[in-house]
């Protein structure tokens, strides 16, 4: 071995160590920086990882179903090309929660409380990622505001009212309860 080869090897090893140290410092710096806020998809992924580490089978199963539903929504032909926004993901979550509520009611009426309980556990997990839902009084106020802002006078204007509610309160309002309330308020004569 020539003396030049030995020095080249030592210099090469020093460069590798220096490069590795630089990369480690850069990684630590990136990790500690506050970047853009977590998206809903990021929160779901992080929670899935935590549930897997904690071996929480119900939570893992539910979050995998949520992620599958989001992926399914993304590959539909009418999906946005840039990916789903948080609002789109909330719409998927609302749909999933509603499906599970209906299933729980069916299981209750069929005398299967254990299956209904499992559905309600999934609903609770899904709702953790949804925005806070409006109370009955808040829904009543929102429906009244929508009726006055659209100038709705009767049942024929129900579509305008529901469109305004969906636009203003997407993901936070139970549209079934809002629809029933709007129908009730539009059917009663104004005094």
Image (tube, helix red, strand yellow):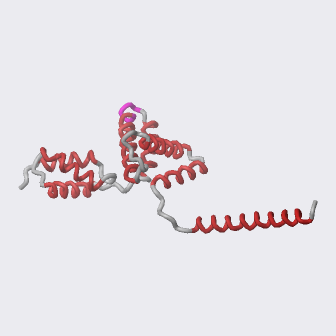
Q: Which quarter of the rendered picture does the N terminus lie within? A: bottom right
Question: Does the magenta run of residues contain 35?
Answer: no
Read off the magenta span.
107-111
* Residue that appears at 56% across and 47% down: 56
Residue 34 located left or right of residue 177: right
* Residue that appears at 19% across and 55% down: 146
Asked if residue 65 can be seen in this view, the reply is: yes
Q: Residue 86: where, in percent of width, then height?
A: 40, 53
The residue most toward the right is: 1
Q: Is most of the magenta stretch helix, strand or loop? A: helix
* Residue that appears at 69% across and 67% down: 22
Residue 12 located left or right of residue 57: right
Q: Residue 81: where, in percent of width, then height?
A: 41, 47
Of residues 57 and 42, which is closer to you in this image?
42
Residue 172 located left or right of residue 6: left
Question: Does the magenta run of residues contain 110?
Answer: yes
The image quadrant of residue 98 is top left
Of residues 84 and 110, which is closer to you in this image?
84
* Residue that appears at 40% across and 43% down: 96
Q: Is residue 98 above or below residue 152?
A: above
């Amino acid at each position: 071995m020539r003396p030049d080869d030995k020095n080249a090897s030592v210099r090469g090893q020093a460069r590798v160590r220096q490069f590795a140290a630089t990369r480690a410092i850069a990684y630590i710096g990136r990790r500690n920086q506050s970047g853009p806020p977590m998206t809903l998809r990021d929160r779901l992924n992080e929670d899935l990882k935590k549930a897997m580490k904690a071996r929480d089978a119900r939570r893992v199963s539910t979050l995998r179903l949520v992620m599958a539903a989001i992926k399914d929504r993304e590959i539909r032909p009418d999906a946005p090309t840039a990916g789903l926004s948080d609002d789109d993901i909330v719409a998927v979550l609302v749909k999933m929660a509603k499906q599970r509520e209906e299933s729980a009611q069916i299981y209750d009426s069929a005398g299967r409380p254990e299956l209904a309980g499992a559905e309600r556990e999934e609903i609770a997990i899904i709702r953790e990622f949804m925005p806070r839902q409006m109370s009955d009084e808040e829904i009543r106020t929102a429906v009244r505001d929508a009726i006055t802002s659209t100038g709705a006078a009767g049942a024929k204007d129900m579509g305008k009212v529901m469109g305004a509610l969906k636009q203003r309160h997407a993901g936070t309002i139970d549209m079934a309860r809002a629809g029933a309330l709007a129908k009730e308020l539009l059917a009663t004569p104004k005094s």
